[in-house]
Amino acid sequence: MFAFTAMAMLMTPQVAAQEQPVEPYKVDPANAGATPFAGEGMARAFGGQDGIRRIVDHFVTANFADRRIGEIFTNQDQVRLRRVLFEQFCYILNAGCTYTGRDMRTAHKDMGVQQGDMNRLVENLQAAMAAEHVPFAAQNRFLAKLAPMRRDVVER
Amino acid sequence: MTAPLRIRIAATAGVLCIATSAGAQQLAEPGKLLLTNGIGSIEGAAGGGLTPWAVIAGNATRDGIGVQASATVAEFKDYDFQVAGISVGAWDRVELSYARQRFDTNWVGGALGLGNDYKFDQDIWGAKVKLAGDLVYGSEWMPAIAAGLQYKKSLDAPIVRAVGAQQSEGADLYVSATKLFLRWSLLANVTLRATKANQNGLLGFGGDKRDARTVHPEGSLAYQVSRRFAVGGEFRSKPDNLGIAREDDWFDAFAAYALNRNLTATVAYADLGSVATVKDQRGVLFQLQGSF
Ligand code: HEM
């Protein structure tokens, strides 16, 4: 077992640090699935790009480690997810980024996400935002941007 | 006790602990977000305290079946009031509920010739169907919409008839629209109820003044302070069918706290106005609600 793991590590030394290629798609900030906030208030409430990056890292780590939804994330490209999710949050919060990822329907196609999974993901995000001391009202304002995306994420 | 036995007991206890905590974790699987199944309304349906919401009881999502139970005690100036309710919510779509209400008249019972501490009791069977929309997700302006029915049966038929009620049982029909407006952290509910219940049925149905259902608006507004904590207010307009006992609209202000996924505590200050000939019935209501 150990030998196998060691060998696998030798054979793919950069596996954890490099993004895997995805099917080609048209890059468009509209893929983020929501229009950005106006003004700088929300970006400030989230601690600017540094705060957003810590929130996304915390959030992604929690999702991969999650007892219920972790399974859905296993074997997905964590490096890419951290990058594009940061872009998406930063773009929507008007903190000075553009979004280069896929649209929500394509990104979550055939993933079999259930409503309970979505709620758990929201709870993980709430925990990540709370850890950065984002005021609750601002957390909810951000969730208001994400809530309509449910139809592209959850299988009916 | 011999040492090996003691060890064995300790080990068994340890295993039991692990087993129960694993079981509790299973039960604690996320379903709905905290507070989004409402509390138990006084008629058993999930909602606010005074009015049903377009939410389905229990923690289950559209992929499961959940249960919710609540116990409510209230003390008003001259009366006491208790409710025990249980409801089952299936697939975040259908809800069936039962509640037993008990209204203790204390000294007023004596004054009305019923005897001190005379108690009015009522059974309420409810059904609710969510027709469209969602409380939290989907379009920002599209509320969850539900329709429901509450069949109520007074257990004091001779008395409520003597008071002037035309029937001792009856059915309320309602539609509710409820939305959590995340951008303001504000939950709003509007319910329209067709009813001829006197004091929600405790004093029977219909009266000398009128014996037909009329439509009455009810509403709730709640501000979500945190994931666990919400404060708000409610009102409920009511018919006034009985000549001898004027009836007023109801109001309350409440604070609800989700201790965890399974337990929500609510306190409210309620103003019922005039009840069974005695005015100014204000008081405090406390509820513990469990949901799975
Ligand atoms: C509104 C809620 C959600 C938002 C805003 C969101 C956002 C994103 C974004 C931006 C991506 C990357 C797209 C890309 O690679 O170009 C992504 C991918 C992914 N999401 Fe979500 N997501 C949401 C809900 C969920 C839920 C509920 C789950 C599962 C529990 C989930 C699981 C995943 C997984 C596993 C990936 C990786 C897909 C892949 O690499 O092919 N997401 N999501």
Image: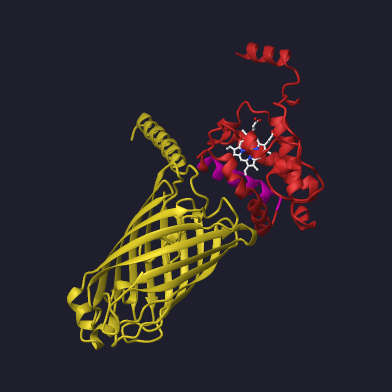
Which quadrant of the structure image shows residue B287?
A: bottom left
Outermost residue, right side: A96
Between A104 and A120, the one lying in front of the other is: A104
Which residue: 30% across, 72% down? B201
A26 w.r.t. B88: above or below? above
Which residue: 56% across, 43% down? A118
Rendering coords of residue B190 (x, y %): 48, 67
Between A33 and B257, the one lying in front of the other is: A33
A106 w.r.t. B248: above or below? above
Q: Is residue B199 visible?
A: yes
Drawn side of residue B135 relative to residue B206, left or right: right
Which residue: 72% across, 24% down? A20
B53 w.r.t. A92: above or below? below
B174 w.r.t. B55: above or below? below
Drawn side of residue A25 relative to residue B292, left or right: right
Which quadrant of the structure image shows residue B212?
A: bottom left
Q: Quadrant of the N terminus of chain A?
A: top right
Give ligand 1's quarter of the image: top right
Image colour assigned to chain A = red
Image colour assigned to chain B = yellow
Between A34 and B15, the one lying in front of the other is: A34
Numbered marks: total: 0
Tell me the chief SS of the magenta region.
helix
Drawn side of residue B193 relative to residue B110, left or right: right
Q: Which residues are magenta?
A: A116-133
Which quadrant of the structure image shows residue A4?
A: top right
Examine the structure image and report whether residue B154 is included in the region drawn in magenta.
no
Rendering coords of residue A12 (x, y %): 72, 16
Which residue: 71% across, 44% down? A55
Rendering coords of residue A120 (x, y %): 56, 43
Q: How is the image coloured?
A: by chain
Drawn side of residue B171 relative to residue B186, left or right: left
